Image (cartoon, rainbow, N blue to C red):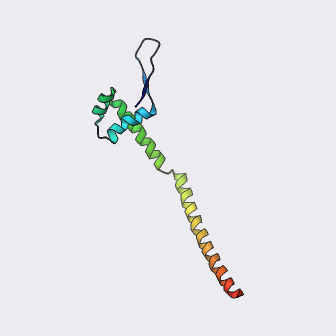
Amino acid sequence: MSKSVSSSKSGGRVRRSFSEEFKRDAVSLVTEQGYSLAEAARSLGLHQNLIRNWRLKFVSKEKKSQGLNEDEKAELKRLREENRKLRMERDILKKATAFFAKESQ
């Protein structure tokens, strides 16, 4: 896990920024390895709210990427219906081809 630190020139608090990989690794300590938020935060030298926020962000991104919106659902329904009709037409054409092949012999 790598983290990057950026400091302010004004001499105030140092604002640390973390790479996406570091954030995912920190969240995986809680979600996959069974650490509590407090344990993970303590071991990484972070506040537990920071890891909690990262976890919420990643979970909401995953939900958005998994689910279909209403337009996509409507298009999927239309495409499935079109696919069903095309298969039916194909089957009819196969039967017609077989019928006419027998007739020509």
Instruction: Give x and y (percent) for residue 84.
Output: 56, 68
Of the pair 33 and 72, the residue shown nearer to us: 33
Residue 98 drawn at (x, y percent): 64, 81
Looking at the image, residue 82 sits to the left or right of residue 42; the answer is right
As drawn, the residue found furthest toward the top would be 11
Q: Nearer the viewer, residue 12 or 33?
A: 33
Instruction: Please tell me whether residue 5 is drawn above or below residue 21 in the rendered image.
Output: above
Q: On the rendered image, what quadrant is the N terminus found in?
A: top left
Compared with 78, 88 (above or below) is below
Q: Is residue 45 left or right of residue 66?
A: left
| Relative vertical location of residue 1 with respect to residue 83 in this rendering, above or below | above
* Residue visible at 56% across and 65% down in the picture: 81
Exactly how many numbered labels are in the figure? 0
Q: Kindly indicate the quadrant of the structure image that contains residue 12.
A: top left
- Residue 24: where, in percent of width, then height? 41, 36
Q: Tell me the quarter of the image containing the C terminus.
A: bottom right
- Give the image location of residue 59, x and y in percent: 40, 42
Residue lying at 42% horizontally and 27% vertically, measured from the top left: 3
The residue that appears at 40% across and 16% down in the rendered structure is: 13
Residue 85, picture quadrant = bottom right
Left or right side of 35 for 61: right
Name the residue rendered at 65%, 84% in the picture. Answer: 99
